Image (cartoon, rainbow, N blue to C red):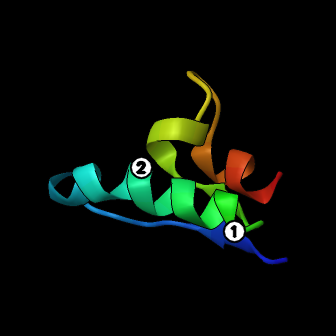
Amino acid sequence: MADIFISYVEEDGDIVEPLARGLIEAGYSCWYYQRSSLPGASYLQQISE
């Protein structure tokens, strides 16, 4: 399956978690800032990894 990057604005934050959860349950790999980021690390580097 594909790797999916979810880009969103803060106002849409409430729908991101259920969306990502559904995609993960369907077998996709998801990255979005709220769940996948590590403090102090460049988010661009984290996305590429």
Say what amino acid the circle numbered 2 marks.
Glu
**Residue 14 higher or lower than 40, as above or below:** below
- For this rendering, which residue is in front, 47 or 22? 22
Identify the disc placed on residue 26. 1
- For this rendering, which residue is in front, 1 or 11? 1
- For this rendering, which residue is in front, 9 or 12? 12
Q: CA distance from mark 1 to mark 2?
A: 14 Å
Q: Residue at x 77, y 66 (%)?
A: 27
Mark 1 or 2 closer to N-term? 2
Could you tell me residue 30's position as x and y percent?
A: 65, 59
Say what amino acid the circle numbered 1 marks.
Ala
Could you tell me residue 16's position as x and y percent?
A: 38, 56
**Residue 13 higher or lower than 22, as above or below:** above
Could you tell me residue 49's position as x and y percent?
A: 83, 51
Q: Residue at x 62, y 55 (%)?
A: 31
Residue at the left extreme of this rendering: 11
Identify the disc placed on residue 17. 2
Q: Residue at x 54, y 53 (%)?
A: 21
Question: Callout 2: helix, strand or loop?
Answer: helix
- Nearer the viewer's eye, disc 1 or disc 2? 1
